[in-house]
Amino acid sequence: MVKGKRNQKPRIRWLREGDSSTKFFHRVVLANQSWNAIRYLRDHTGLRIYNQQQIKGMAWAYFKNLLGSESRGIVPMTVGEIRDIHPFRFSSTLANELTQIPSDEEIKAVFFKMPKCKAPGPDGFPAEFFIDAWEIVGDEAIQAVKEFFTSGRMLKKFNATTIALIPKITGADELSQFRPVSCCSTVYKVVARLLKRHLKLFMPDAVQHNQVGCIKGRLLCKNVLLASELVTGFLGAENLWALDASRSGSWSWKSLCQLRQLARPFVVCEVGSSTSASFWHDNWTSLGSLYQLTNGRGPRLSGLPENAVVRDALVNDNWWLHSSRSRNPTISLFKNSLPDHREIVASEAEDCFLWRVGENFPGTDFSTSLMWNHLYDHLPEVSWHKSVWFRGRIPKHAFITWLVALDRLSTRDRMRRWGISVSPLCLLCSSADESRQHLFFDCGYSKEVWAFFFSAFQLSPPPLFMDVLNWLKALTRDSNVNLILKLTFQASFYMIWKERNSRLHFQSSLPAASLFTEIQQLLRAKMDILSKEQRNLPSTVTFLSTWRLVFNIH
């Protein structure tokens, strides 16, 4: 608690004094300049070098050696050679899309969606400059981007890059302890994003399926896991469902194997040539795993080995049991459940493993949401969920509000019902028994908090907690006011609960007036973040201006 308050004090002072030309602001600027400057570097002998020209020469030589030079001995492949080794070809429709010049609206949208608060390039103009001054520089910025797509050339100043050195460790004084980061101009970044949109049109088709890096929908970890396990020979000739993972393998492999029984009902095998599907362990019939179906007795009763594939069960283009006269119920079950052998004998396709969730048709794609909905029961939807989980919420505040709504906080009335011997009195007022309703609404301390904010909004909420949640869903037509109200209520719930626990565990207390101030500072910082996100929307009243209007802040 004490440490948290100590960490918040610099932030509070910055909110109060950091946005003005104060001594505090200039001290911070000087401190940052001193922190970011490289005063000296050590050379290969460990000698400190203070001369700035020598430092520049050391950096240039180090990174030139690190990055290497252009190799003039390598001859690039011709277009014809590339065509011979790669089957992908552009369609006429795709070629037309790729050669289209971006429209003014597309270019403007990319400018306005650029990340904020990023280091600028050599020209010193970050994305915020273009957004705030769009009426003045917008047309020229659009023409600068279009020039690249029409001529294939970019102005050298736009293509220039500042290489900043970021220390890997505190007190870095050797070049190997710095990480070079390229700071590009905003126009360059916009062009790169537009090119990326073009690449997305054909990259999944042009890049072979065994290449999984940087392609949407493909996971690099798939190849990593596959390569690591195959190289060490975990599987060999064993079947995934039958192998004993405890004998060897990495921790991640053993963890995955522990989930086999959970995943098994959802993995089905579509038999093609039948040369890889396990007859006993894979789910290739309508009955699931035949090995589990017979409690492990199937191989012994039928004479077909446990490691047999489906193709091994075909003798003279028919099932090996077709002429059996055995009355054993297991043998009879096999004969009645095996599919038509003629389709398998004639098939030239590979065996294929698919995901099947519930009654859905098997497919190659795995859906997390579909699996979750299948495994877990759907609870009835509550009417107040939009008052807790909404866009722009502060996660920890929303979580506490959710627990309050479900009455899952350890208030003293609940603790006494659990048989724990504690005083029933409220920790904030000591005048009534502590419960959810009393702690957050009926307590005199909480009433002071609510009175402060209610007077600012000029509203009178209902007296009961659950009624308040439903009341918050849509108070006014002003979306800014609605969001600010929800954030204020959640922050108040959070801070009241935090103050209650501070008195219980640390015997420290704050007056209600201090809680007002702390809640306002938290929400003021949140309004600032939300307002920056609104810059992309034209003619919009920001959250921050609405906040100032509500609380008469000028």
Image: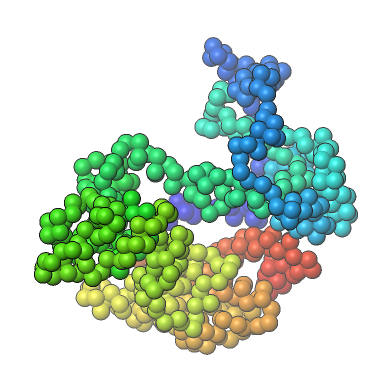
Q: Is 537 situated above or below 300?
A: below
User: Which residue is at the far top?
Assistant: 45
Name which residue lies at 36% across and 80% down: 435
Q: Number of labelled discs?
A: 0
Name which residue lies at 35% across and 70% down: 375
Residue 228 appears in the picture as rendered? yes
Name which residue lies at 77% across and 58% down: 106
Please state the horizontal and vertical placement of residue 22, each as a whole percent of the image. 72, 48
Please state the horizontal and vertical placement of residue 76, each as a whole percent of the image. 68, 27
Residue 269 appears in the picture as rendered? no
Q: Is 30 situated above or below 322?
A: above
| Nearer to us in this view, 64 or 304 | 304
Quarter of the image with the N terminus in it: bottom left
| Nearer to us in this view, 48 or 361 | 361
Q: Is 101 situated above or below 383?
A: above
- In-image side of 73 versus 98 (left or right): left
Residue 79 appears in which quarter of the rendering?
top right
Residue 24 appears in which quarter of the rendering?
top right
Name which residue lies at 33% across and 46% down: 252
Please state the horizontal and vertical placement of residue 355, each as a whole percent of the image. 40, 62
Q: Is 330 situated above or below 107?
A: below
| Nearer to us in this view, 479 or 154 | 154
